[in-house]
Image (cartoon, rainbow, N blue to C red):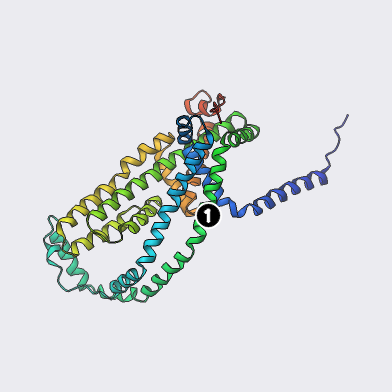
Amino acid sequence: MSMPSQDLPRTTLGVLFIAALIVGSLWILRPFLGPGIWAAMLVVSTWPLLLTLQRRLWNRRWLAVTVMTLLLVVLLLLPLTLAVAALINHIDQIGEAVRLLTTWRPPRTPPQWLSGLPFVGVQLKRAWSEAVSLGVDGLFNLLTPYAGNLTRWLLLEVGSVGRLLLQFLVTAALASVMYATGEGWAAALVRFARRLGGEQGVAVVELAAQAIRGVALGVGGTALIQALLAGVGLALAGVPMAGLLTMAMFMLCIAQIGALPVLVPATVWVFWSGETGWGVFLAVWSLVVATMDNIVRPVLIRLGADLPLLLIFTGVIGGLLAFGLVGIFIGPVVLAVAYTLLDAWARPASDGLAAAVVAPRPPPKEPPTA
């Protein structure tokens, strides 16, 4: 007896309808996709902290959610507000400094303090003389037309900060909802993963959560520590606008560029101001801050996920270039999941990593809720 023929038009229309429904839903939710991804990353990264707070607050979930939401608002909005306020208050000084920088021309002979630096003074004096003889003035002439453009760009960026503040508020609101109903969201995601890929799909969900925590601790934690220490050094050395420079260094550290693009000019400025002692201090401090990430970042990443450091680093850089700031989390998660699935497929099932991914895992215990 032959099997009944498939209704191809009906199946095709059903698939098209589902695809159109998914695309329409994503289009409607498009304004909330960015804040939603950020909120999910923040909730997954700080979920252990929420559970700790809940235990200390008499197992009252609403109290823990309130505290975590207030912390997010303070950590997200306060630094940005302070940075914007500092930028607005010093916008005239920044424009004047840019103008003076483009009109400044180096003297034919280097300053006396440059020649007196230990170990490198003679080499720096020779490099200064060679740069002047090669016509470094032409470089400053090329930079002069961009002074006004830079000031106008800063004003435009300040004008767009209101939209960023609104996105942060939406992120904090979505995060508070996820904190309150986190177990339900996690259970729905686990059911979907099990339906899609069985126990291996559940393991991938757990791996994604570990990767998010590892990146949040390794990248975000290291950037915060570096920026704060660098900001303390700038404040002690008397560098103006230390708060604004600290915010800039935090963003540079998040982007894996580091704090040296800010610390090196600040150190040169301190030496140029005649404060040789503070200049030496800031130079040594900058060296410590710039190299500490080689020790701090691997330790913090290992606390969240036992993944290769090269994979995390590549995911952070590639995700940042591909998806913007949120790609710092998306990139390592995607690479971590792909790496683990490929490694589990290539190894025998009895091997350590493959068995850890394929083997069934007990369901997580849910904490008591209020």
Query: Is residue 335 visible to the viewer in this orientation of the structure?
Result: no
Vertical side of 339 occupied by 151: above or below = below
Q: Which amino acid is tagged 1?
A: Gln
Left or right side of 222 for 305: right
Q: Which residue: 25% across, 47% down? A: 288
Q: Which residue: 50% across, 43% down? A: 41
**Quadrant occupied by the N terminus:** top right
Number of marks in the image?
Answer: 1
Left or right side of 130 for 299: right
Vertical side of 256 occupied by 177: above or below = above
Name the residue carrying label 1: 167
On the image, the x and y values in percent for residue 181 come to: 58, 37
On the image, the x and y values in percent for residue 244 come to: 35, 59
Vertical side of 162 occupied by 96: above or below = below
Vertical side of 13 occupied by 270: above or below = below
On the image, the x and y values in percent for residue 156 come to: 46, 68
Circle 1 crowding by C-alpha within 10 Å: few under 14, some 14–19, many from 20: some
Left or right side of 332 for 114: left
Taking depth in this image into account, of 40 and 257 the one nearest to the observer is 40
Q: Which residue: 32% across, 69% down? A: 93
**Quadrant occupied by the C terminus:** top right
Which SS class for mark 1?
helix
Left or right side of 49 for 40: right
Query: Is residue 207 visible to the viewer in this orientation of the structure?
Result: yes
Taking depth in this image into account, of 170 and 268 the one nearest to the observer is 170
On the image, the x and y values in percent for residue 123 come to: 15, 61
Q: Which residue: 32% across, 71% down? A: 98
Taking depth in this image into account, of 359 and 215 the one nearest to the observer is 215
